[in-house]
Image: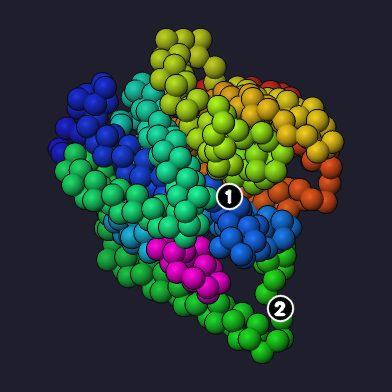
């Protein structure tokens, strides 16, 4: 039985025609993204900066691997984060605990020393894994199934993501590149604290959405807690063992070794999860079909993000090393290019939200939107190929090349990302809503992992060749996705 307070939340239209609780989640996500994108805008620049200027002095190959590891794990941990919320804490508490860990992680990056740097990255991974999938799940819960406002609501929610992403490179990027890298990370942590305060104060507008629902069977609840304890114990044991082996010199935990291992884990994790959801026991025929549809969207999403997330990697390096960053005599930080995409998203998201509703029955299907997203991101890197060829002579190219690239990527992003979030809430089995959303973020993690591996090749391949490879993959993937539109729609029951 649905709690009356949740019914009241779903009936509310006080936030631009949407439930007031959407505003609470909008600003929570905005500040979390302020923290994430502020840190991300600085990360690879900080790692490759000389130690004399306060950086870590890492070579690009090593920095690219660490960047890919971090950004992949941020989303990969969304899977256990969703499971923890489903089985133990509920989404509401998971978001709170995640925000606390994120704040602690950012403040660890302020402290000098590699130990604090790596500790900060681990805390950021754990915190984002708890917060990110579960705040999106709560957005889905404040709408009824079949509510036509859902896709529009996710587009508005997505604006919150991009307002945070807009402000943070300007603020954190300026502080980090011109004053102190570590103070830039500290400012990102302050943003997450602001988000936590807002989340606590605005929780009353969510009704019971995201609250933990204990199993009716007491023994089942006890079994879940024991399983969680065993799982946590196993993780701790593995970490202790790896630390001991590394300390004794038995193995060398290099970024490349960890990155290679993560690649294997991602393949087996994804294959295992979808094999269980499609072929495992206990699933209805309808759930199996929807899981197969999620698999198609998962693969398309991973390919999209492998290109899109070059923004913080290879495109960030291109901005620093090969782009003319002088405007009216003012030399601006390379990280400021990271706010270009959010400007376009904030400008275009309302247009997309209006367009999907205005088209009515003519609205493109979810698979069609995914194909469009892949096409736009492929074209964005095709645009960068001549820019890279011009820069190969040593000349600094105009910033308009990157601006045009980010415009095309934004057109693709708005076709795929908020639509994908909405699709997961529609396709997910109710008993595994959080974990299914976690699988969506695993697809983003796979894409980020591939983006990091591609960034690590920035100095090994001609940049024009690197960008051309990314462009080719995007365009070919768009064609394949276009061919899969009809069968995917059937699997989705459309």
Element assignment for label 2: loop
Residue 173 to residue 77: above or below:
above
User: From where the camera sits, is residue 285 visible?
Assistant: no
- Mark 2 neighbour density, 10 Å: few (under 14) some (14–19) many (20 or more): some
Residue range highlighted in magenta: 105-129
Identified at 58% across, 56% down, the residue is: 46
Identified at 65% across, 82% down, the residue is: 246
Examine the structure image and report whether residue 281 is included in the region drawn in magenta: no
Number of callouts: 2
Identified at 51% across, 63% down, the residue is: 121
Mark number, residue 252: 2
Residue 251 to residue 259: above or below:
below
Q: Residue furthest bottom?
A: 248
Q: Looking at the rendering, which quadrant does residue 261 occupy?
A: bottom right
Residue 366 to residue 74: above or below:
above
Q: Mark 1 = which residue?
A: 445
Place of residue 84 in the rendered image (x, y in percent of width and height, measured from the top left): 39, 60
Place of residue 126 in the rendered image (x, y in percent of width and height, measured from the top left): 45, 61
């Amino acid at each position: 039985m649905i709690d009356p307070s949740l019914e009241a939340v779903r009936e509310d239209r006080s936030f631009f025609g949407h439930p007031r609780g959407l505003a609470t989640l909008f600003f929570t996500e905005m500040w979390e993204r302020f923290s994430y994108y502020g840190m991300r805008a600085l990360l690879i620049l900080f790692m490759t900066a000389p130690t004399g200027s306060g950086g870590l002095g890492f070579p690009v190959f090593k920095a690219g691997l660490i960047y890919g590891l971090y950004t992949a794990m941020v989303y990969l941990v969304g899977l256990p984060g969703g499971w923890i919320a489903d089985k133990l804490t509920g989404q509401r508490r998971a978001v709170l605990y995640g925000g606390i860990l994120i704040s602690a992680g950012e403040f660890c990056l302020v402290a000098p020393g590699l130990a604090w740097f790596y500790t900060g990255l681990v805390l950021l991974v754990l915190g984002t894994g708890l917060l990110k999938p579960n705040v999106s799940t709560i957005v889905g819960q404040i709408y009824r199934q079949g509510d036509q406002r859902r896709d529009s609501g996710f587009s508005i929610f997505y604006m919150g993501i991009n307002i945070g992403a807009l402000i943070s490179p300007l603020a954190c990027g300026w502080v980090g590149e011109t004053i102190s890298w570590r103070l830039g990370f500290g400012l990102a942590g302050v943003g997450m604290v602001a988000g936590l305060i807002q989340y606590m104060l605005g929780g009353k507008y969510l009704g019971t959405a995201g609250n933990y629902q204990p199993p009716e069977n007491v023994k089942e609840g006890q079994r879940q807690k024991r399983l969680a304890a065993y799982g946590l114990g196993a993780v701790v044991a593995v970490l202790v063992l790896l630390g001991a082996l590394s300390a004794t010199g038995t193995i060398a935990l290099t970024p490349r070794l960890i990155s290679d291992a993560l690649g294997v884990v991602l393949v087996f994790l994804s294959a295992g999860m979808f094999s269980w959801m499609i072929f495992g026991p206990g699933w209805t025929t309808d759930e199996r079909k929807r899981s197969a549809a999620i698999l198609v969207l998962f693969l398309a999403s991973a390919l999209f993000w492998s290109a899109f997330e070059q923004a913080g990697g290879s495109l960030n390096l291109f901005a620093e090393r090969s782009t003319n960053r002088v405007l009216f005599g003012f030399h601006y930080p390379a990280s400021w290019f990271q706010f270009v995409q959010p400007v376009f998203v904030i400008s275009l998201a309302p247009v997309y939200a209006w367009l999907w509703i205005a088209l009515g029955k003519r609205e493109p299907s979810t698979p069609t939107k995914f194909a469009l997203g892949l096409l736009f991101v492929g074209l964005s890197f095709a645009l960068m190929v001549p820019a890279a060829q011009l820069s190969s002579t040593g000349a600094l190219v105009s910033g308009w090349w990157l601006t045009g690239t980010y415009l095309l990527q934004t057109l693709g992003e708005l076709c795929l990302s908020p639509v994908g979030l909405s699709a997961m809430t529609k396709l997910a089995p109710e008993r595994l809503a959080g974990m299914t959303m976690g699988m969506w973020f695993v697809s983003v993690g796979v894409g980020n992992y591939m983006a990091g591996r591609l960034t690590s090749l920035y100095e090994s391949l001609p940049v024009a060749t690197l960008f051309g490879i990314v462009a080719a993959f995007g365009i070919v993937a768009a064609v394949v996705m276009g061919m899969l539109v009809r069968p995917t729609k059937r699997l989705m029951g459309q």
